Structures are given as structure tokens and as C-alpha cells.
Amino acid sequence: RIPRVRGGGTHRSGQGAFGNMCRGGHMFAPLKVYRRWHRKVNVAQKRYAIASAIAASGVPSLVQARGHTISAVNEVPLVIANKVEQLTKTSEAVSLLKNLGVWADIERVYGANSIRSGKGKMRDRKYKKKAGPVIVYNSNGGVKEAFRNIPGVSVVSVHNLNILKLAPGGHVGRLIIWSEDAFAALDGIYGTSEAGSSKKGFNLPLPKMTVTDFSRIVESESVVKAHKAKKVSAVTSYKIKRNPLKNQAAMAKLNPYARIHKKLVRLAATRKATKA
């Protein structure tokens, strides 16, 4: 049953209303604002992810694989003096980035604005831009205000690191510029292989292998000599299984009399045909 518009005196009266099949009616299963927007993640997993992202940011190949331009950067991870925390002007921040050789990565952000696909264009997210370097500081003496207006640059505190800033889109290897105090504070926050962490119940994940190039280990002379030679199989090919009901040669192997029987049946059929 479809409800009708009440009253009279207009064409609208008596028409169907409210149903999703009605003109001017409601839509089926409308989107609600009380959806499950967030996902709960264990605190230990978050800390593990942040520690992994920090470790990946110190590998130049992973930083380049993520798309950053670091050909002019002297070293990765990039640790600079604490004076960066006292910068207050954007012009000073720009000159610092140029001196560090990071400005090429900012230019990559400038030239890579693209329009977002999908409905995000309607929701104040029309343009997408690349992620540039992230500045990690220990104490804010104006560094947030100095860098915040440069496209693609993020500024975070070492005491409040965010996995979304260190690995945007789930891709590790973001270019991180550390202040000297911020880099020194990492050992106290996350611990080392010898000392514990200030985070309760968290221990820094230890590597399972000292050398991660597994193929180089397996193919090394010492390992090859200690193992047996590769066993070469005597069977080079497998016979195809033939159906004896369809293949005469296979039937002859199973039943040598089959050919004679087939010939006799054929002769008997021809004799019968000639007599008729």
C-alpha cells in the first residue's frame, strides 16, 4: 500500500507519496550520518606501525620509491640543527628547504595538483596533491607557523607522531626532516634494543634477520657447499593416459584379441548385408 496525499483542490491531492517509487517521494535506504566512520586499532599496533614507518623513512631506496625527489639531499634520515624550531617566517622556511636540497620535492607538489575522481569533488575535496616532506620538531618556537603555508609540507611533534603523516595512504618511506632534539627524543619514547620504552607495555620490534637479502644468503658459496646438490628427476616427461574405448592402440595393449574381434564383427555385418 502506498500512502496518498491528503486534501483536495490540486493535482497533487490523491497522488502517491513517501514511497521510493513515487514522484517526490523518499529514497530507499538513505545514507545516515550515524555510520561507522572509524575503526578501532590496538594501541600496540599503532606504535608498531609508527616505529616501522620511522625505520622505513631512513632507507633512501624506500623514500625514492614513494616518489620523493632526494637527489640533492645529502643524507637520509635528514637531521638538522635545533634552530629550525625557532623559525617564524615562511620565507626563512623556504630558504632553509632550498639549502637542504629539498625544494625540488616541493616543486613536485606544485606541479602535481589533480582533480579527484568520484563524489569527493562535491564535498570540498576537489583537488588532490602530492605529499612533500614532513617536519618533526621537539618544541614549537614558531616552526608550525613557518612551514604550514608551504604546499605538501606537514609539521608534527615528535611526542605526537601520526601514522597518517609518516605513511600517507599506507605507503611507508615519507621524507622526514628531523630537528636534532626530536631525533634524540626517539630513543626515550620508543626505546632501543638495550633500553626500554617510555610507552607502557611496548617494546621496540627487533629484526628477525640481520641480513634481509635472503637470495644472497642462499646463493652464497658457504651455504651452497653445505647443502646437497640439486636432485635432478629421472622422469622428464609423463605418458598421456589414453582412453582404450576410443584409442585402438591402447585397447590392443589391454586386449590383443580386440582387433580380431572387431574385424570379425565387420565381416559378419557385410555378409549379412549381401545376403539381404
Image: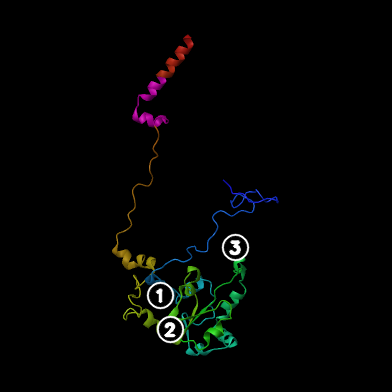
Q: CA distance from mark 2 to mark 3?
A: 40 Å
Q: Which residue is mark 3?
A: 119
Residue 35 vs residue 47, the one in the foreground: 35
Q: Which residue is mark 1?
A: 51
- Looking at the figure, which quarter contains the N terminus? top right
Name the dominant secondary structure of the magenta segment. Answer: helix
Q: Which residue is mark 2?
A: 183
Q: Secondary structure at mark 3?
A: helix
Q: Earlier in the sequence, mark 2 or mark 1?
A: 1
Q: CA distance from mark 1 to mark 3?
A: 34 Å
- Image coordinates of residue 116 in percent, x first then y, are 60, 66
Q: What range of the chain is rendered magenta?
A: 244-263
Residue 24 vs residue 82, the one in the foreground: 24
Q: Secondary structure at mark 1?
A: helix
Q: Nearer the viewer, mark 1 or mark 3?
A: 3
| Point 41% across, 85% down: residue | 184
Q: Is residue 251 above or below residue 130?
A: above
- Image coordinates of residue 219 in percent, x first then y, are 36, 65
Residue 67 vs residue 266, the one in the foreground: 67
User: Which residue is at the far top?
Assistant: 275
